[in-house]
Structures are given as structure tokens and as C-alpha cells.
Amino acid sequence: FNLLSSRSFVTAIEQNFDPRGRFQAAKFPLYDEIKQILVTLYGQCCERINTEQETSKERLDCVGIYAMYVLYRHLLPPNIIPDAKLHKSLWSVFPAMCPVMELYGPLYFMPREFMMSYAPYKAVKGCSADVPEIRSGAAAMVIKWNGSFKARVAKIRLDALGWIAMADSELSPTVPESHSRSGNEDGDGDVEEYLLASSVASIEAATNTILRGMIIAHSASILLRSQLVAHRALHLNYDRDHIPSLMSLMEVLKSIEKMLVVRRRSAVLSFQRSTLKMIASNILKKFDKIRSFVDQCSSSMDFSRNSERARSITRVSACLTALEGVLKGSTSFSHIRRHSIAFSIAACMDTMILEVFTTDDLLTVEGHLKDLSQVASIEETLNQVCDCSFLYFYRDLFPECVNRLYQTNLNSAVSHTQLVMAAFSDPERILKHVRHLDRDPQSGVTPCVTGYRNFVLSHLKEEYVGPICEMIETDLRLVTSGAKGVDSRLRKLIISTPLYVCQTKLDVKTEVEKYLEKTFYDLCSLNLNDCITYTEMR
């Protein structure tokens, strides 16, 4: 922002870089253009925040919007009064929904602090406060929301359980036919039409299921990140009763990732390709009448006169050719291909096209483009949303989470330990990209990866495996003395599947055997008379 406030930058950005553009012709100031963009983007983002349509993009976009507002304020001439209504909206709407927002890890963004630092406007009533007052107000909101945190997590968890059951059937490798063909024997055309409709319906149902899982993952990720960063930024203590809810959000994220990225990956990729073909075909169908119109005009128009209409027809025809080539060229749509499609469609929009292409058609194509972008980026979005690498910056919660897992597994028939361990293993993804530290020549990893791995394994053995070993030893002593029967809960813990944490296998049964062997050996060495007792316990 020192750059933004410098005289050279302000002078440069106020220049009219396009003498033939609208800024000079219409005398439209640049700051008014930025203001209109601000209002539009801010309204679009705030409409989606705290709804099912929210993704991780809207809150980050709001950070850019606040930066654009600072630019707008710096571009305003001294004789122009800033828009008080816009300032009040930026002060009250988004901060009331998100007083603290995570940027990355422990880095956070507080919109009201940002505005007071770089774009204060004390003339607007109720839109001015010092930093302690802003932080106390944000803390009050976070404490208030803590009362409904468990209920919100319970709703997301219930939605995730229902979705997993649905996804397991909708995304199965072989989907049985649910309709009879007895009524479609009148002709081959009817049979083909029936098969096509059935196939399209199954593809739509599977794609909607995938997208529904992504919506639930977005909700869980946003709630988990916002809860952690708000308490850390405002120096609020975590409620110990909220630890199980935090772990439930981790379980939701990793279970959705496991379903779509591991278990049903082949089905997801297959339905993704089919859906992209359908969307591309629907876009092309909307432009069929434009192609017919352009071809008809081309055949009946004299291009030798070099009229404006002839140039427009040539341009639109070239854009249509490019659009058809991109849509028909491949079933994969990268960012560049999607931007090429959008650019080609925008270039096709000419005043003469409105004769055959209505506003409703344009809105329909816009919806198809959004669907295309959403379906094409399924894998990328899942990797981003379900990634729990940010837990590295909240690793102080790990011992308490492991302790809660032990208590839960001891008294419950269902165990989700592996899902939580998978969440706390994700920080290795970012630690492997650290470049300023030397790598170990044998393992090929940096000291920070080794340190985090040792941290996780040591606390897991101390808070989870250790109590199990002590309980089994105590139970064996009681059984040997005939004072008590075998605790039925221990068998479930011993025969549980091995845990995989940070690419390391941890078998509870093996760890218990090592502990008991060492304990019996040490005690027998101290007192040889107890060898018979320890042999019986063994």
C-alpha cells in the first residue's frame, strides 16, 4: 500500500491508456468504473456466504474486494467525496458474517481493521472504531456462535452420512436397470430413445450426487477453518467440549475424499467425462441457430463492399469455428480451454446476433458454462477442499484429539480414528515442499517433516497406545489373581486394523505385545520369584 499511495503510481494509473476507448469519449473516470465493479462483486459474494452455494472462493474474493476499495479511495480526487453507502456496506455486511477470515494457516484478515488502517472514513456514523474495540466486537460474535457450533456440526455430519449411503449406490461400478423394456417393443427408435433417456438420467443423478458431496465438503471445511482461525486470531480458548465436533468435521472431509478420490474414483471419472460431453453438446445446440444465421448471411452477402455488417459476419463465423473446435476437440476442459470457450462466446455476441439469440438463450449458456467449470474441476476442487494441511498450525490440538479418540473408541462400537489420523497426516503435503532446509540423504525429507512425524507418533503412542497397554496389563493381573473377568472392550482395541499416520504403520496389537514383553522381562529381572506369575500372564 506504500506503492498505492505513491504519487508516481497514482499519476500512472490515472492515464488514459486507450485514446479510442470509452473513458475519453464518455469522460468516464476510472474510479467510477472501479466502484461499479466493487458493488457488483461485493453483492455477488455476500449473497453466497453462509449458504449451501458458498465455496472457498467467495471469502477470498472479498479480501480482493477490500483491496480494490482501498485502490478506489486512493484514486479519488481531493474534491470528490467517497461513497458513504459503499463504505457502510463494507463495514457492516461482510464483517457481520465473517469477522475473521483465514488467508493461509495462522495468517488471517480482519476487514474492519483493514479498513481503519488503509481507508478510514470517520465521517460515516458507526463506521469507525479502534483496534481493541474491533477485536472485542469480533470476539463477542465468535463466543455467541460457539453456542450453535455443535448443532451446525451435527447437521453437516448427518448430511454427510446420508450422502455416503447415497453415493455408495449411485456411484457403484455397475448400475442395474430399474425400468422394464416390455413397453418399448414397438420399434427400434422407441427402444433407442428409452435407452438414451435412461442413460442421461443416470448420468445426471450420479453427477448431482458428486456435486452434493462437494457442497457438504465445502461447508465442513469452511466451518472448521473459520472456527480454528477465529479462536487463534482473537486469543480465545478452545472449548474442550467442541473437540469432538472439530474431529467430526475432519471425519466428514476425509470420508468424502475417500469416497470420491479412492473408492469410487473410476466411476467419478467416467461420469465426469460423460457429463462434460453432455454440457458441451448443449452449448453447441444453443449456437446451432447462430451458425445457420451466419451461414445464410454469408451466402447472400457481398463481401467486396467491405461493409461493417460483412466484417461482423466474418468475425462471428471465425469465433463460432473456434468455439466448435474447442468444444469438440477433447473431453477434458482445463482452465485455458474453459476461458477460451467463454472468450469465444463473448466474441460471438454482436448486435445482429440478437435477431436469433435471445437474452434467455444467453442466460442458459451462462448456466452451462458454470456447470462446465464446476464439473471439469471436480478433482482439483476435492484436493483443495478436503486438504487438512492447515492443521499443522493447530497441532497443539492433536494430543487432546487423540485422548478423545481413545475415550470414544473405548466406549463405542464404531471407530473413526483412521479418518482423524488421515487429517493430521495432511500437513506432510506442505512440509515436503519446504526448500530452505537441507534434506536428509537417506530418507530424502527435511527436518521439519521428520520433526512433525515424530511429534504425531509420540503423542499417538502416549495418549492412545499407552493407556491401552496399561489397561491390558491391569486386566491381565486381575485375571491371573482371579479377581475379575476379561474386559470385553479391550479385544476390540487389540484386533482393530493398523493405523497409518504420516506414511507410517502403527499396529496397536504389535505395540501392546512389545510393551508387555518389555514389562514382563524387566519385572522378572528384578524378582525371579515372579517368573511363574508373568509366564501365566503371558
Image: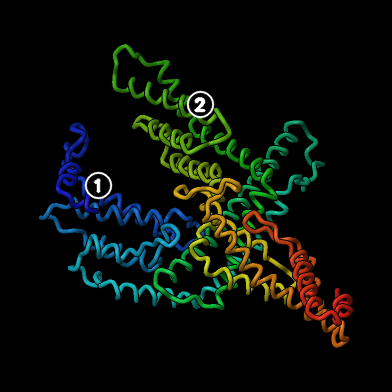
Q: Secondary structure at mark 1?
A: helix
In the picture, measured across the screen, residue 177 lies left or right of residue 356, that is: right
Label 1 amino acid? Glu
State the separation of the CA atoms marked 2 and 1.
35 Å
Q: Secondary structure beneath disc 2?
A: helix
Q: Where, by quadrant of the figure, is residue 119 drawn? A: bottom left
Quadrant hosting residue 470: bottom right
Give the answer, above or below, for where 24 lies relative to 73.
above
Residue at image point 19% right, 58% down: 82
Packing grade of label 1 (10 A; few <14, some 14-19, many >=20) is few
Q: Residue reaching furthest left? A: 79
Q: Residue at x 62, y 38 (%)?
A: 273
Q: Residue 247, position in %: x, y? A: 59, 68
Residue 214: image x %, image y %?
57, 54
Judging depth in this view, the residue of 207 and 12 nearest the camera is: 12
Q: Nearer the viewer, residue 407 or 248?
A: 407
For badge 2, the amino acid type reads Gly
Where does label 1 land, which residue?
Answer: 33
**Front-most of 475 and 94?**
475
- The furthest residue to the bottom: 483
For mark 2, what is the residue?
325
Answer left or right for 351 relative to 375: left
Image quadrant of residue 153? bottom right
